[in-house]
Image (cartoon, rainbow, N blue to C red):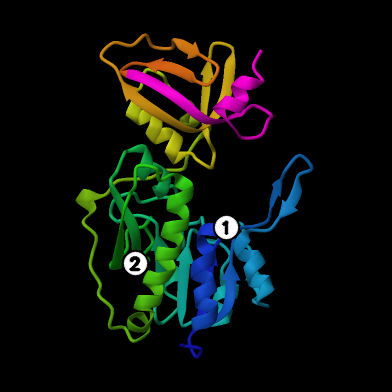
């Protein structure tokens, strides 16, 4: 343990929880910085982030600036030895990064310099990558451009979704930081500059990205379904049907009539440019998630 080390932790979603939990046990977290509470649901109730909830449960002060670039004096006043970020959601100014004597460390869910940005898990799956992982890095004023400390790799399985990768990589991030924490504190850790020529980006997912295009190759459609499960879910609109798709399989065919639908008692098949998509689990608009057989049983 390094309880004499004062840490300011910056994170927001569930992905950031394992790292925070480890730091609470291993160091002294003097302040947690997270995004402002958001309105959720039909009643637009203010909801705190998962990271804020865990911080309050452990009696740690919470700071929620709307613009961290303009409002970070409270972090300076906390006098941290180290800043750690994980899926915080805002780019930090250099003046903030310069505050802690041990630097500012980021836990990022890709093998940098590939997939810099806010949605690396989704983009890795969208592009059909076979491997991903976690990068531990020093932060600079750019977006995920700082020097790499260490990486941990993960071989993506055919049935992995954004949900499964999210949980696996969150725990890998915790373990990698815990493994390197002592060398970061003693300033003996490895430090390697990124090759910017190899960099790719993972920008935020937009509403139009969710729509399934039946003119896409079948494997890319399956990749989209995996990438957007469990959130925001791939959206399928065809004939008089519209629903979110959570699971499907693809079978290649030499000839296929794009958009043709075949429905039997147990199957819902859709022809795409190079084969057939067989739906397995869907969420009809305004209804709960169900397997395709249950959906067909209630179909007129």
Q: How many marks?
A: 2
Residue 199 placed where, x, y %?
26, 49
The residue identified by callout 2 is 137
Q: Residue at x 51, y 62 (%)?
A: 16
Q: Name, please, the residue furthest toward the right.
A: 43
Is residue 63 at least partly visible in the picture? no
Please provide the residue range marked out in magenta: 275-300
- Indicate which disc residue 67 carries: 1
- Of marks 2 and 1, the one in the foreground: 2
Question: Dot 1 lies on which element?
Answer: loop
Q: Work out which quarter of the rendered image holds the C terminus and state it.
A: top right
Q: Residue at x 45, y 46 (%)?
A: 162
Question: Dot 2 lies on which element?
Answer: strand
Q: Is residue 238 above or below residue 43?
A: above
Residue 289 placed where, x, y %?
61, 35
Q: Residue at x 39, y 61 (%)?
A: 141
């Amino acid at each position: 343990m390094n309880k004499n080390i004062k840490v300011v932790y910056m994170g927001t979603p569930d992905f950031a929880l394992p790292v925070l939990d480890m730091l609470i046990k291993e160091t002294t977290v003097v302040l947690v910085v997270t995004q402002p509470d958001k309105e959720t649901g039909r009643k637009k109730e203010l909801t705190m982030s998962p990271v804020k909830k865990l911080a309050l449960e452990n009696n740690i002060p919470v700071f929620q600036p709307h613009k961290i670039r303009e409002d970070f004096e409270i972090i300076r006043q906390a006098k941290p030895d180290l800043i750690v970020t994980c899926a915080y959601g805002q780019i930090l100014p250099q003046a903030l990064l310069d505050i802690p004597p041990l630097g500012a460390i980021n836990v990022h869910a890709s093998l940098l310099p590939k997939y810099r940005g806010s949605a690396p898990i989704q983009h890795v799956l969208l592009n059909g990558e076979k491997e991903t992982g976690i990068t531990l890095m020093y932060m600079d004023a750019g977006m995920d451009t700082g020097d790499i400390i260490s990486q941990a790799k993960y071989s993506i399985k055919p049935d992995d979704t954004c949900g499964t990768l999210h949980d696996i990589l969150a725990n890998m991030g915790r373990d990698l930081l815990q493994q390197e924490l002592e060398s970061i504190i003693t300033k003996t850790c490895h430090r390697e500059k990124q090759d910017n020529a190899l960099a790719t980006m993972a920008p935020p997912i937009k509403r139009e990205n969710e729509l399934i295009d039946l003119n896409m190759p079948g494997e890319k459609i399956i990749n989209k379904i995996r990438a957007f499960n469990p959130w925001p879910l791939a959206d399928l609109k065809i004939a008089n049907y519209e629903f979110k798709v959570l699971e499907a399989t693809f079978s290649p065919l030499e000839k296929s009539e794009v958009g043709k639908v075949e429905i039997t008692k147990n199957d819902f098949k859709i022809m795409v440019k190079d084969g057939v998509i067989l739906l397995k689990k869907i969420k009809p608009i305004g209804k709960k998630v169900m397997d395709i057989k249950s959906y067909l049983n209630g179909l007129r």
